[in-house]
Amino acid sequence: MPTQFPAMGGGDSRRTNVVVVSRPMSDDVKRLDEAPLNLFHLRTVVLSGVGFFTDAYDLFIIGAALVLLKDQWHLHKEMVGLVGSTTLLANFVGAFLFGRLADLLGRKKFYVTVPVIMAVASLLTAFSPNIWWLLVFRFLLGVGIGGDYPLSAVMTSEYANVRDRGKLVGLVFSMQAVGLIAGPIVAITLLASGLPHGMVWRLMLGLGALPSCAVIYLRSKIPESPRYKAQVLGYSESQAALSDSDATLANRPVVATGKVSLFQFLTNRKMLLTLLGTAGTWFMFDYAYYGNSISTPQILKLVAPGANLLQTEAWTLIVFAVFAVPGYFLAVGFVDKIGHRRLQLIGFAVMGLAFLAMGIFPGVTTAIVPFLLLYGISYFFSEFGPNTTTFILAAELYPTSVRTTGHGLSAGTAKIGAFIGVFLFPSLSTALGLRGTLIITGVFSAIGFVLTFLLPEAANRSLDEVAGQEKVHGHSYVKQVPNRA
């Protein structure tokens, strides 16, 4: 039963009582924590992962398309940077907007909405009549992609068991590896087909709609998160376990709501420190990662000026396939054994050293083989490290009532870092050269390493334990109700 405390001060006869809901974790939530891996876990991972494959494909294919667009529409370097980074800037809008809405109104409806936005926007980019409309449609696409970050991560983490949570959320993120591979394969295939370049870049962008369309219906069949029902909406144990098809009168909250205002979130010291850790590390990483990943064709052109577009795309594919993909899947296999925070520290350390080595040692940026080796090492430890762990940690360090808000703010802030990295790359590489640009990337990696120490270790701990659920909800589960005495 809720405990009532009289409101302090004043002689108003309409004084209110503060109702604080304090109850132990429900048996249903405990069963989620302790459940063995099953087909439903796999289904959730696949549906979230396909969305994330689309995210990766749509974000990275623009790098290849820009090489063609630059010549066709005679784009100057500032416009190249803007086209490559607009989607990333929009990610902040989408991640924060849908992350916040998912905490206020529920996960499921927006879990279905974001792939619709991505599918429509991908098709529209393929039919862009000029550069300005392409920017508008890429921005819309970015809003959908940004929204998919907190929803895919949190839907998976809230259904996951304790022992395999890092693995399951990491598997969702590892679909980025498939998107990374798909982009160069599509680009190479279309370039080798002999089709006009004006059609090739439109096909590259438009094909991103296919995987989004494939998951819309199936996502609509995933039930709402039981953790959200029990811990935020206040459903009783049996009600939280009901499927969405059991929409009867019983499916109503029976206790005070556990929703938390954005003001409460941003004025809670514990939440702010966690946000500095999750958003700060992710910002530093995304500056380093996206600034190079989306600009990889341009980087390889600087290293080997005589290479044609087909060669640079082939080298890109080699780096992604030989270094990045194994990094993703080894991270999935070992993240729960090594530890989520510890793996992030390892990854930041080695990728930072690789970037610094490329920038400091003369001759590396003019010889393709040593450059590809160090560049590949940086990719391996990006995936076997912060690219995977920033996504996982932001989905487990916040209480249920603000979990998608925290993840959305972290992912959105990260994409501002990515935007800055991509937008500035053409100008920085001109002003400082490739070596200077890579040294800056190494410094950002070092800052990410330091900020990681703000975060607790989350591996093999329940979501409620990691987030301090009882303590935070002692503040958050508060509702003003009339005193009927």
Image: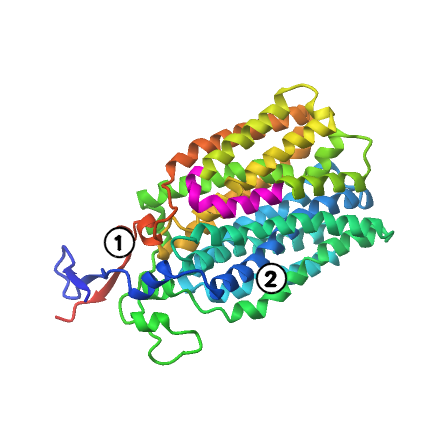
User: Element under label 1?
Assistant: helix
Identity of the residue drawn at 87% across and 51% down: 194
Identity of the residue drawn at 46% across and 59% down: 155
Q: From the viewer's perspective, is 258 left or right of 185? A: left
User: What is the CA distance from the residue labelled 1 to the residue labelled 2?
Assistant: 36 Å
Q: Is residue 340 magenta?
A: yes
Instruction: Tell me the kind of residue under disc 2.
Output: Ile
**In front: 439, or 387?**
387
Q: Is residue 230 above or below residue 370?
A: below
Q: Is residue 393 above or below residue 252?
A: above
Q: Callout 2: 10 Å neighbours few (<14), some, many (20+)? A: many
Prevailing SS of the magenta stretch: helix
* Quadrant of the drawing holding the C terminus: bottom left
Range of magenta residues: 324-342
Q: Nearer the viewer, mark 1 or mark 2?
A: 1
Identity of the residue drawn at 24% across and 54% down: 474
Q: Is residue 433 magenta?
A: no
Question: Would you name the residue on which mark 1 appears?
Answer: 470
Question: Would you name the residue on which mark 2 appears?
Answer: 117
Image spot of residue 147 (x, y percent): 53, 56
Instruction: Tell me the kind of residue under disc 1.
Output: Glu
Of label 1 and label 2, which has the lower sequence position? 2
Q: Is residue 96 visible?
A: no
Q: Is residue 228 visible?
A: yes
Instruction: Identify the mark at residue 49; answer none if there is no mark.
Output: none
